Image (spheres, rainbow, N blue to C red):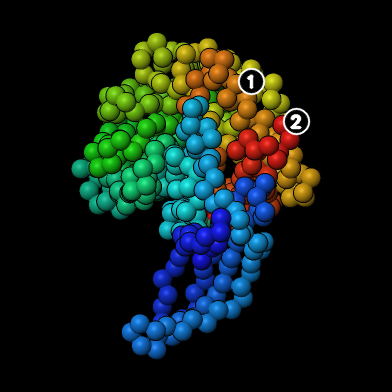
């Protein structure tokens, strides 16, 4: 129970099902603005319940960790993050199914975001059904078998909570199984690649099945699809601006796979669903030009609605001016822009660096709003790539602190910077 504004109430910020006689762990957090008496409450407790009678339960509590408990007099109903930016764009977060299963995460998502992107579960390696494909190769050769359970997790959560969902991602060289590109769906990596005709048929069928399933079963939930992800790479060894070395899409179909993917997506997607090309390092000179040219051609054919800028940034790189000129350039295409996977790679969590991170987020959010205000870029959503530092993909080799919430789901200066709160310096 939480006391606030002289009253008291129950706030749902974490729950678990207790099993008789077994220890369970309950974790949750309550978020409050920095200018109130305290920055927040975090609790984590182990407890064991032993039913004495039908309506009397003893609860044993152990190992309670509580931070900053002085919350009397706090306004709990402060403006949610998405409301702060509601006149500009949707505010989204990348989440995974593990988090959807836990109230401590979902309570924050429901409170502060109006869009989600599944970090992994809507990618081909989570959807393609190898066992069924292999059971009847003739039947599934041109119409790959799909499993829907992984798709359902995010779609169901979004639908139940009135959230929009960015579908990520239909066509990508990564997280698409190697066997999908081989004759007879062979797992032998020396087996021949399937022909161009076969791969075009598989591409068409996969896009049709996934898009159709989402819109028929969860109408209005998906508002944008990343149709193609990371097809452009201007490094040495890649052909004509396209990622060729490590892309089996390129190696089986050629650069035409991009246009064909958009053609199929346009054919099957409901007209209000926006089709995006999504990529990282979109500010690097050669890559900007290659993406621009490709998108211009797709636009002329009426196949694309927007560019997704992943925006995996550093604390200093790219500069705000660089981000601005990149946005301006893509803005000139007259397509929508979405910031699809924003995070700021930082390996220090000193107070000073966390404040710098807050300022960096504040500068970016101010820039995005400025670009919209001036009509320079039609930014329609901004998504942060993960909720808690603890679960960031950037922790792969070394501990990082890139996101808005810390390991205990407490809002960091980064959150208040993103919120454009006065407590965070703008420069
Ligand atoms: O599912 C397997 C599991 O079975 C296995 O035991 C475990 C062992 O490592 O790996 C699990 O898969 C991991 C998967 O995330 C789910 O946790 C992969 O190894 C891991 O590589 C994968 O990382 C994802 C990465 O894409 C893969 O490219 C990240 O979570 C995800 O955040 C990241 O997101 C991408 C965007 O889709 C596209 N833009 C770049 C961005 C960052 O890489």
Q: Secondary structure at mark 2?
A: loop
- In depth, the one of 360 and 1 nearer the eye is 1
Label 2 residue near ligand 1, CB within 8 Å: no
CB within 8 Å, label 2 to label 1? no
Q: Residue at x 52, y 82 (%)?
A: 60
Q: Residue at x 52, y 32 (%)?
A: 85
Q: Residue 417 at what x, y percent from top left? A: 65, 38
- In depth, the one of 68 and 312 nearer the eye is 68
Q: Residue 76 at what x, y percent from top left? A: 54, 52
Q: Residue 248 at what x, y percent from top left? A: 45, 34
- In depth, the one of 209 and 50 nearer the eye is 50
Number of numbered discs present? 2
Q: Quadrant of residue 427?
A: top right
Label 1 residue near ligand 1, CB within 8 Å: no
- Whether residue 236 sits left or right of residue 189 in the image: it is right
Q: Earlier in the sequence, mark 2 or mark 1?
A: 1
Q: Residue extending furthest left?
A: 139
Q: Residue extending furthest front?
A: 6
Q: Residue at x 43, y 26 (%)?
A: 276
Query: In this view of the protein, can residue 82 be seen by the observer?
Result: yes
Label 2 crowding class (10 Å Cα cut-off): few <14, some 14-19, many 20+?
A: few
- The mark found on residue 304 in the picture is none
Q: Residue at x 55, y 48 (%)?
A: 387
Label 1 crowding class (10 Å Cα cut-off): few <14, some 14-19, many 20+?
A: some
Mark 2 or mark 1: which is in front? 2
Q: Quadrant of residue 67?
A: bottom right
Q: Which residue is mark 1?
A: 324
How far apart marks 2 and 1 lie (CA) works out to 16 Å
Q: Which residue is mark 2?
A: 427
- Whether residue 411 sits left or right of residue 334 in the image: it is right
Query: In this view of the protein, can residue 130 be seen by the observer?
Result: no
């Amino acid at each position: 129970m939480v006391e606030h504004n002289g009253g008291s109430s129950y706030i749902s910020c974490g729950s678990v099902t207790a099993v008789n006689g077994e220890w369970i762990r309950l974790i949750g957090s309550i978020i409050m603005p920095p200018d109130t008496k305290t920055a927040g409450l975090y609790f984590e407790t182990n407890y064991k319940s032993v039913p004495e009678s039908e309506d009397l339960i003893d609860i044993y509590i152990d190992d309670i960790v509580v931070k900053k408990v002085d919350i009397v007099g706090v306004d709990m109903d402060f403006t949610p993050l998405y409301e702060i930016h509601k006149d500009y764009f949707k505010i989204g977060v990348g989440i995974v199914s593990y988090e959807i299963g836990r109230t401590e995460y979902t309570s924050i998502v429901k409170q502060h975001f109006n869009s989600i992107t599944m970090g992994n579960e809507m990618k081909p390696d989570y959807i393609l059904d190898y066992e069924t494909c292999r059971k009847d190769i003739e039947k599934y050769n041109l119409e790959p078998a799909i499993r829907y359970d992984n798709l359902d997790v995010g779609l169901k959560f979004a639908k139940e909570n009135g959230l929009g969902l960015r579908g990520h991602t239909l066509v990508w060289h990564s997280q698409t199984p190697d066997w999908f590109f081989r004759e007879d769906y062979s797992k032998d990596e020396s087996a021949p690649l399937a022909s161009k005709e076969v791969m075009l048929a598989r591409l068409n069928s996969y896009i049709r099945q996934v898009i159709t399933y989402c819109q028929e079963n969860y109408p209005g939930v998906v508002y944008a699809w990343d149709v193609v992800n990371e097809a452009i790479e201007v490094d040495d060894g890649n052909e004509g601006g396209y990622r060729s070395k490590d892309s089996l899409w390129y190696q089986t179909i050629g650069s035409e796979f991009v246009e064909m993917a958009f053609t199929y997506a346009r054919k099957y997607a409901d007209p209000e669903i926006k089709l995006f090309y999504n990529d990282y390092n979109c500010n690097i000179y050669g890559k900007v030009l290659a993406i621009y040219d490709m998108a211009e051609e797709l636009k002329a054919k009426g196949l694309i609605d927007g560019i997704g800028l992943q925006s995996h940034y550093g604390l200093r790189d790219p500069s705000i001016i660089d981000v601005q000129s990149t946005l301006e350039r893509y803005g000139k295409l007259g397509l929508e822009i979405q910031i699809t996977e924003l995070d700021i790679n930082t390996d220090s969590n000193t107070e000073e660096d966390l404040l710098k991170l807050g300022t960096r987020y504040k500068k970016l959010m101010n820039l995005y709003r400025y670009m919209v205000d001036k009509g320079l870029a039609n930014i329609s959503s901004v998504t942060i790539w993960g909720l808690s530092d603890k679960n960031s993909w950037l922790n792969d080799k070394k501990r990082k602190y890139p996101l808005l919430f810390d390991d205990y789901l407490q809002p960091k200066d980064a959150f208040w910077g993103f919120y454009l709160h006065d407590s965070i310096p703008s420069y």
